[in-house]
Image: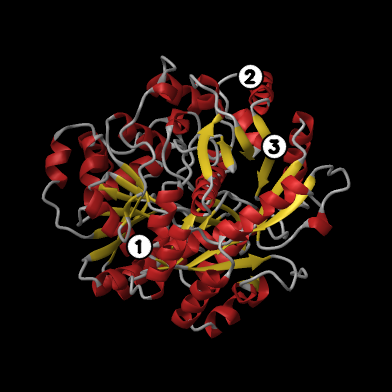
Amino acid sequence: MRQEDIGRTVDRMAQASLTEEVRGAPLGVTIIIPNWNHEYVLPRSVITALRTVKVFAEHDVPAEVLVVDDSSRDGSITLLRQLEALYYEDGFRAIILPKNQGPAVARNYAITQATYRYTLMLDADNEVFPETAHIFYRTIRETEAAMVYGPLCFLRNGEVQEIYGYQSIDNRLFIRNYIDAFTLLDRQQVADVHGYLNNINVYAREDWELILRLTVTGRRIVFLPVILGLYHMLPDSMILGADAEDNVSNNYANRVYNQLGFRGDQPINTQYLRYHPDIGYF
Amino acid sequence: MKVGIVIAGNINYYYNVTGERTQEALQAAGHEADLFTLGDYVKGDTQRSYDVCLLVNTYDLIVGYDGTEQEAEKKLRQMFTNMGQVMAVGLEAAQTKWFSNIAHRNTQLGVNALLDYGFADQSKLLPRDFHMKYQFVMNGLTPSERADAEDQLTSAQSRPIPWAFVGHSTPERQNLIYQLTQEIARDGFVYIPKLEPVREDGPHINRQQLQAVLDKTKWFVWSAHHDHLYVEHVRFRQALESGALPLKIMQNTIDIPEEVPFQYLVVHIDDLVERLAEIPYEATRKRFIQDFLDIPPLEETLVEAIENLANTGK
């Protein structure tokens, strides 16, 4: 992949034509794993993703795994080529970006390259629960939401640190994020709002910025109170940076999404949207 | 007997429901019972007099009043002048700070009698600085709840959700949920918002929403943030309403008084997997419903308790 090709793709994310590009994608799920120097933990997320593909198949839902490597310098690329050789028939693909561009570009590029309408955004240090992923799929189909998220169990050295993403959306989201990137997305709707923002002001908080953009454009973001998977916290996990006080990101979010300061009082479409396919909205 | 029942109406639905159940029980026993908020009473054209006034969580009545706490206390004192006897209604574990705080608030207002709803008499567990007259009320079912429970005995409701946990987030509860996902089933229902006051218009799950969840759930699991016997009587009844089986998880070993019902549904966390594997679900569900039906009805225990407290107290 040449640098200019990637650049053109990213540019397309800012154009309405992208919506056309992803429109008409067949129903199903592409599990996207952006990777950068996570050779040692990547097999764990890939294996759970491949198991999830099998569980989807049991429910007649086509699925695949797509790893986009952001130009890793560890052994990830060799590993990915081996995994591709072993699991291509099981729906595994890997794309290696020629230059490191950061998670927003890697995710956006993956969204353009996915086969299916819905994308499960898994990180290399995450594990998805194959048994629950299908409940998320049912939810996004039944609610027509742009995003469905659920609680995640954060582990450090195998010990529970926190259950994160624990409640539905309200206006507090404009002050502080409490939803991880590990979610199920309707990539058509994500493309409509031009994907993740590649901007240093929101580095490591691109997922928050996307959630805010979906929220203010009236998209539905639905909370499903079922654990989607595990987040293994590593010394350099992005969640650590995202969780820390970051005035640059906060100022940016405030400037763009709440500059008049009335978001706290303005109803949002997605306020308290909670859904479970066996219950409905509740 | 003419009874006025005062609820906050806008804070914690546990207490609003307790007010509604109290009204139903008293009416079923042939008494006149009105349910209102302090604000409604104050605004009323004619402020009625009652033989007995029941305050369903005095703390919430004060906080939930549309005005300052001082104004709420003043209005409560004014209201008391129209009441024969004033009694507080409690649902709390006697060893908790919350119990003491509410008792202290009652004493400050001159309310000196407590009707303690629960599954076990707590008179031996009362804090040293508790100066109210105490009367235990076995928290059985109201007539409508008994009719619903009879229906649940024969219900064949499908329950695709293996377990549900609803409660504010604590480290112990997070560990328990992780254990449930690893050892029981991953697709349980998890709702653990951060601790904040429960309001009908807030992010918490209200009574109807919880019931909708439990209607589709096999096991309603919970673990209190302390190991005292807390609102078991409320949680067990919530499970009963939907025909789900409740399961209280204890983080530590404590001696549970012999008279506490449903001990077969109280499990130490270390025994969770083993016990769940050995409990026959449908037979235990029916046993639970029948055992609840066998507890004396609320209208009997409540009227007796009010009369005891009004006449002699303890």
Specify the amino acid type for callout 2: Thr
Specify the amino acid type for callout 1: Ala
> How far across and how far down the image is residue A278, in percent?
31, 61
- The residue marked by circle 2 belongs to what chain? B
Quadrant of the rendered image containing residue B241? bottom left
Apparent side of residue B176 relative to residue B259 in the rendered image (left or right): left
Q: Which mark is residue A133?
A: 1
> How far across and how far down the image is residue B6, in percent?
57, 36
Of circles 3 and 1, the one toward us is 3
Mark 3 falls on what kind of element?
strand
Work out whether residue B96 or residue B173 is closer to the camera in this orientation and state it. Answer: B96
> How far across and how far down the image is residue B108, in percent?
78, 30
Q: Residues within 10 Å of mark 1 (few under 14, many from 20)?
A: many
Specify the amino acid type for callout 3: Gln
Q: Are marks 3 and 1 on the same chain?
A: no
The residue at the point 23 percent across, 41 percent down is A189
Of circles 2 and 3, the one toward us is 3
Q: Which mark is residue B85?
A: 3
Work out whether residue A193 or residue A88 is closer to the camera in this orientation and state it. Answer: A193
Work out whether residue A31 or residue A84 is closer to the camera in this orientation and state it. Answer: A31
Query: Gap between marks 3 and 1, in whole Å?
Result: 58 Å
Apparent side of residue A279 relative to residue B260 in the rendered image (left or right): left
Q: Residues within 10 Å of mark 3 (few under 14, many from 20)?
A: some
Of circles 1 and 2, the one toward us is 2
> How far across and how far down the image is residue B112, in percent?
77, 39
Quadrant of the rendered image containing residue B186? bottom left
